[in-house]
Image: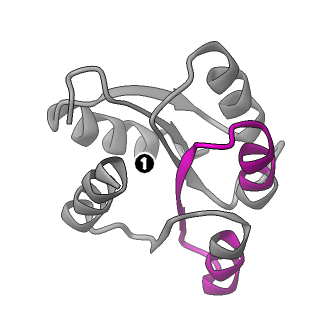
Amino acid sequence: MSPSTTILVIEDQASVRKLIAQVLEEAGYQVYQAADGRQGLAQLHAHPVDLVLTDLEMPEMNGLDLILELTRTFLDVKVIAMSGHSVEKLQTARLLGARQTFVKPLNLLELLRAIEYELQH
């Protein structure tokens, strides 16, 4: 990981978003945050990132619509999806382009390993 490796965390629950961002920052990543898919897209246009970590259940623009838009607009983007609601939606997220998926509550160590793996491959 280079010091300038950037990750965008898109999660509507502020406490979860901030916790993930803190863990990633402590691991040495530069982290941007967004509360929903629309904010996430705006962030990406302003600050392209190396990886997007997104929830699937969000207001405004859900994670599945976001992944579809990301894979159309940002061809090289790496996406990891997470959800505490629907395993079926996580499977759909993979079909739409998410490289890995996680069920909430998250195992933060496993998430960090997955992020490191995706950034190296």
Up-down: is 67 above or below 77? Answer: below
On the rendered structure, is 112 left or right of 71? left
The magenta span reads: 66-93
- Reply above or below: 93 against 49: below
| Residue positioned 59% across, 56% down in the render | 55
Instruction: Specify few, some or many for label 1: CA neighbours under 10 Å numbering under 14, 14-19, or 20 or more.
Output: some
Give the residue pinned by disc 1.
16
Q: Nearer the viewer, residue 12 or 113?
A: 113
Front one among 115 and 22: 115
Image height of 1 relative to 62, above or below: above
Where is residue 102 drawn, in percent x and y? 45, 71
Q: Which residue is drawn at 29% across and 20% down?
A: 4
- The residue at the far bottom in this view is 88
Report the quarter where the C terminus lies. bottom left
Instruction: Please count the marks in the image.
Output: 1
Which corner quadrant of the image does residue 45 belong to?
Answer: top right
Q: Where is residue 67 in the image (x, y as percent from the top left)?
A: 71, 54
Q: Which amino acid does the dot numbered 1 rest on?
A: Val
Q: Quadrant of the N terminus?
A: top left
Residue 64 sits in quarter: bottom right
Q: On the rendered structure, is 13 left or right of 69?
A: left
Residue 109 on image: x %, y %: 19, 62
Q: Residue at x 39, y 70 (%)?
A: 105
| Residue 89 part of the magenta segment | yes
Q: In x, y percent, where is residue 98?
A: 59, 63
**Quick check: 79 above or below 30?**
below
Left or right: 116 as drawn, with respect to 21: left
Instruction: Tell whether position 117 is magenta.
Output: no
